[in-house]
Image (cartoon, rainbow, N blue to C red):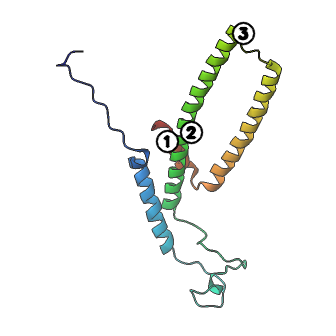
Amino acid sequence: MNPGAAQPEVPNRLPIWKSKSVVFSVAAIFFGLLLWGREPARQQSGTGSPGSLTASVATDGHPHALKPSSPALFRLGAGYLGGFFFGWLLRRSLKMALALATTALVVIALGKHSGLIDLDWAGLQAHVTQSLEWVTGELGALKHFLTGYLPSAVATGIGIFMGTRSA
């Protein structure tokens, strides 16, 4: 190696929680919560004073702990943040899963070639089919979670994309 040659600079990567998009989404969540607290109260039926429990009972008779709608800023920030960390976790787990699967295939191939491993292919196929059915059901539950609990699907999708890009 030439001592006079310039060494390539290794970029200093920030921790995932210090990325600009995460900081902006946390700020959006914070300001959305502030706006949520300032949202004007809706007309409700009740006989008590504005701060009493009976004033917080809506026309359907059920008390509401939070106002029925949240500002879009909070929804977008929460959706992006949830999607970002889901994408980041997905990328990390996929890398680990691929590494483990490759290692397992190499070990199985070497064991089969040397005669140490004799596989029951019918049983293995049944186990893989059962596992794929389980994963399909879990992915359906994950889809239900993402569409039902994360507030903004577009922000969540962008967050997943950005989360998988940053590793």
Q: CA distance from mark 1 to mark 2?
A: 8 Å
Q: Contact (CB < 8 A) between labels 1 and 2?
A: yes
Q: Is residue 101 above or below residue 16?
A: above
Image point (52%, 46%), residue name: 85
| Image mark for residue 163 | 1
Residue 107, image x, y percentages: 63, 18
**Between disc 2 and disc 3, whose residue precedes?**
2
Q: Which residue is mark 2?
A: 90
Q: Which residue is mark 3?
A: 115
Q: Is residue 77 above or below residue 52?
A: above
Q: CA distance from mark 2 to mark 3?
A: 37 Å
Residue 141, image x, y percentages: 71, 47
Quadrant location of residue 110? top right
Three-letter amino acid code of the residue under disc 1: Gly
Three-letter amino acid code of the residue under disc 2: Leu
Residue 40, image x, y percentages: 52, 77
Report the mark closest to the observer, 1 or 2.
Answer: 2
Quadrant location of residue 41? bottom right
Image point (50%, 61%), residue name: 74
Q: Is residue 142 above or below residue 77?
A: above
Assign a secondary structure to mark 2: helix
Residue 98, image x, y percentages: 58, 27
Assign a secondary structure to mark 3: loop
Image point (72%, 77%), residue name: 60
Image point (54%, 41%), residue name: 89
- Pick the front one: 110 or 38: 110
**Between disc 1 and disc 2, whose residue precedes?**
2
Q: Contact (CB < 8 A) between labels 3 and 1?
A: no
